Amino acid sequence: AYNFSAGPAVLPVPVLEEVRDELLCLPGARSSLLEMSHRDKQFVDILHDAENSLRSLLGIGDDHAVLFLQGGAALQFSMIPANLLRGTGKSAAYLQTGTWGKKAIAEAKKEGDVSIAYDASGSNFDHTPGSGDYNVPDDAAYLYYCSNETIQGVQFQSEPPCPGSVPLVCDASSDFLCRPLDMEKYGILYACAQKNAGPAGVTVVVIKRDLLGIGSDKLPGYLNYKNHADNDSEWNTPPTFAIYVLGKVAKWLANDVGGLDAMEQANRTKASLLYDVIDGSGRFYTGHARPESRSIMNVTFTLPNDDLQSKFISTAAEHDLVNLKGHRSVGGIRASIYNAMPLDGVKALAGFMSDFASKNA
Ligand code: PLP
């Protein structure tokens, strides 16, 4: 079946095959990676290799640390303000463009003063702001946004404007590695792995080294970024298996796909197949996101009524197109077409959508 789950989501088949082949005994080792100490040189090499693969894919320079953490993306909702806001007397600015940004704001408010510089809730989170739609003071603790709102299918097409003195912080959980980025623009960019980068269990945090010292020593140890950076993500036991698979996904992107430019091209091709069907359906399908804010990772749309939506989901499953139900909070249909979703899977879905519309319109 083609699996359109929003996450944990599809992994590249060659990666799964390699993991299967190496599961019982890691080549060159005397045990499975699952049984190996995180201090074992072989694992430490795997961790460094994963880090270096991410660095070369994204062009991450030495002024950023790359951390492999646990607690999911959700822990970052708290860790970011705990480190960069708590006790600073400053205010942090947030762009609220969907459910995940809203959740991040709720957690940040527990740590300090937060201002919502832009709020798209009034239009049911169907767009991202244009430049000039919001203001951020020069002394803000940081500007936070979610580059791709997984539930609404709304994606920033590029980084939002941010004063040079203010660190830009991005939740890239559901579009990490889907396109090249200018990492110099980011104070922090983080992503849980389970959409584009690997299995659930590891969250990648790329953080400018000059932000590491802001968090107080009084923070719980795990919550202080500096501890992880000073100890090469081995302040405590990191999620070894998830890091190992993530390293393989990064290599697949570099070697099999041809890098992030090629990946973006492929993702745009896949997404336009679905958006073209939506736009050509004579309003049988209605896209949730405004065209200029459409996500190339999560394509969200509705049908004329709930009965047709249920029929769409069950008939699609009979055609081996699974996990298309929209998030429970917004309903409708959501097709998540992350990096590892093959073009053939999207073609199959686009064909099914056209066929379903012509039979049911
Ligand atoms: N941020 C975004 C954009 C997400 O899509 C998700 C999960 O779907 C999260 C945060 C939360 O991730 P986690 O469940 O790893 O905490």
Image (cartoon, grey):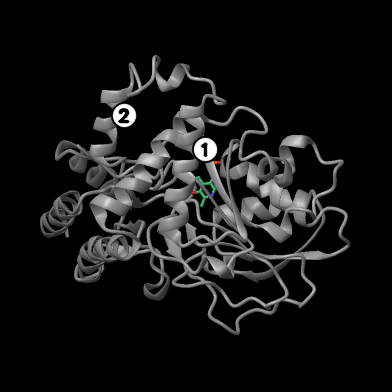
Residue 22: % across, % down = 30, 24
Local packing at callout 1 (Cα closer than 10 Å; few below 14, some 14-19, many 20+) is many
Q: Is residue 104 above or below residue 194?
A: below
**Kind of residue at badge 1:** Val
Q: CA distance from mark 2 to mark 1?
A: 17 Å
User: Can you tell which of label 2 and label 1 is closer to the viewer?
Assistant: 2
SS at mark 2 in the image:
helix
- Residue 261: quadrant of the picture: bottom left
Residue 140: % across, % down = 77, 70
Q: Quadrant where the C terminus lies? A: bottom left
- Residue 272: quadrant of the picture: bottom left
- Residue at (32% x, 64% y) in the render: 264
- Name the foreground residue: 164 vs 105: 164
- Name the foreground residue: 329 vs 334: 334
Residue 68: % across, % down = 56, 41
Residue to which mark 1 is pinned: 202
Q: Is residue 347 left or right of residue 64?
A: left
- Residue 302: quadrant of the picture: bottom left
Q: Which of disc 1 and disc 2 is earlier in sequence? A: 2
Residue 176 visible? The answer is: yes
Q: Quadrant where the N terminus lies? A: top left
- Name the foreground residue: 321 vs 255: 255
Local packing at callout 2 (Cα closer than 10 Å; few below 14, some 14-19, many 20+) is some
**Kind of residue at badge 2:** Val
Q: Is residue 83 left or right of residue 217?
A: left
Residue 258: % across, % down = 26, 58
Query: Which numbered marker is on residue 82?
Result: none
Residue to which mark 2 is pinned: 19
Residue 336 visible? The answer is: no
- Residue at (57% x, 45% y) in the render: 73
